Image (tube, helix red, strand yellow):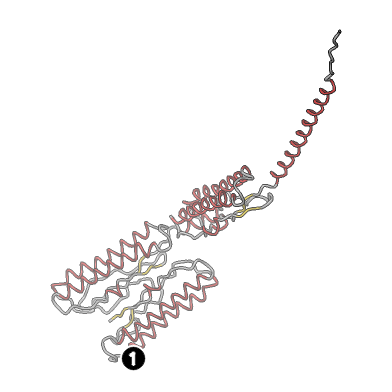
Amino acid sequence: MKRYQSYRSNAGGSNIRRWRVAGVAGVAVALVGVGLGVAAAADSAVPTVNCPTVADKLGAVPAQAQAEISRNLQLLNTQIQEANNRIRTSQGQGGANFVQNAILGPLKDKRFATINRMETAIGRTLAKPNLNAEGLSGCSLNANGGGNASPEPANVPAAAVSAGAAAVANVGTVNCPNVVINVAVPAQAQAEIDRNLALLQTQINEANARIKSSVGQGGANFVQNAILGPLKDKRFATINRMETAIGRNAAKPNLNAEGLSTCSLNAAGGGGAAETPAAPVNNGNNGNGNGNGNNGGNAGVNDGTATVNCPNVVINVAVPAQAQAEIDRNLALLQTQINEANARIKNSVGQGGANFIQNAILGPLEDKRFATINRMETAIGRNAAKPNLNAEGLAPCSLNQ
């Protein structure tokens, strides 16, 4: 019996498989094409950071700081570019808050430090400005590819540089009330008194030198905290030593160490008068030497009546035009207050006991002066950075005998 083997053709199956492979490949190509299209669309909608500009807030920039300011302005641009690049390359990473936490937050910290460096660079030559680093460091996000932040300029305008450089040479000086020896000085104490009067002048000279050599250092309160404060302590100790020196051979006087130890600041170019050697009685000299007209003293009083001696109130910042009239009114008011106090002293001779003048005239005068100086700070502060005119230190007045 002959056996026959059956053969089944696979030609049809091969064709089917070939069609299946071709179909899969076609779908894959189509999907890749769709994916590329989506990616291209997504790339065109990548958000960018939007940061406030800094260069237009700089104001006067001294020549010495121009290069450093330019470097930091360019660094601000670089920081923005790096943030935009990080946003573009990290699409889809990290959840809803990724951009805020990983990009905008660190960018704010970098900008804050950079703007602070610019403040310091200017402050080495001029008064350190407040560029509002806190407000200018934060950046927002332009959604859907909404454009880029305005770039900072490469150079600082020449006009700003020349304006700043012109102000470099002008520095303030300390303004201290003269220490009046209003009692007879025993012969045994004369040399010590003269040495301490000379020391008071040395302390003033050293403070002026420190002010000149430290322009722009340490922020708005640097002069007060690092120079005027220590000067007050030194003067207080020196005046006390003079009281003690006289007190060894006569009744110990009260030279008003508390009132005479406090010094203020003359605006650029002003200067104080030197201390003078002690005579048996010195009828007063306010030691300010800058002629701004709100010190009191004994002008116009020739009958032996005491007069008030007030430290000069110096406006050591630029006064906005909007505040000038109010500043002038308050400076005039300071002089009026002094005139009224002098008139009250003259009209009340012999009244009220030992502390009458202090309690009834000098105390209220201090309160009036404090309020007046504060009003000037507020007037300036409405249109510029509010200054510290040292109302606490400049309000008390002493007495010329």
Q: Is residue 391 left or right of residue 279?
A: right
Which residue is nearer to you in this view: 368 or 31?
Answer: 31
Q: Residue furthest top?
A: 1
Q: Is residue 330 left or right of residue 23?
A: left
Q: Residue at x 44, y 67 (%)?
A: 316
Q: Which residue is mark 1?
A: 347
Q: Is residue 251 above or below residue 26?
A: below
Q: Is residue 48 above or below residue 180?
A: above
Number of marks in picture = 1
Which residue is nearer to you in this view: 100 or 124?
Answer: 100
Q: Is residue 259 left or right of residue 334?
A: left
Q: Quadrant of the C terminus?
A: bottom left
User: Where residue 222 appears, x then y in whole percent?
Assistant: 39, 61
Q: Quadrant of the N terminus?
A: top right
Q: Residue at x 18, y 73 (%)?
A: 244
Where residue 313 sits, quadrant-wise, is: bottom left
Which residue is nearer to you in this view: 215 or 161?
Answer: 215
Instruction: Indicate the secondary structure of the residue bearing disc 1.
Output: helix
User: Where residue 67 appears, x then y in whole percent?
Assistant: 50, 48
Characterize the local packing of mark 1: few (<14), some (14-19) or many (20 or more) Cα atoms within 10 angstroms.
Answer: few
Amino acid of disc 1: Asn
User: Where residue 356 appears, x then y in whole percent?
Assistant: 30, 87
Q: Residue at x 78, y 34 (%)?
A: 27
Where residue 207 sits, quadrant-wise, is: bottom left
Which residue is nearer to you in this view: 180 or 86?
Answer: 86
Where residue 173 sits, quadrant-wise, is: bottom left
User: Where residue 324 appears, x then y in whole percent?
Assistant: 51, 73
Q: Is residue 158 above or below residue 20?
A: below
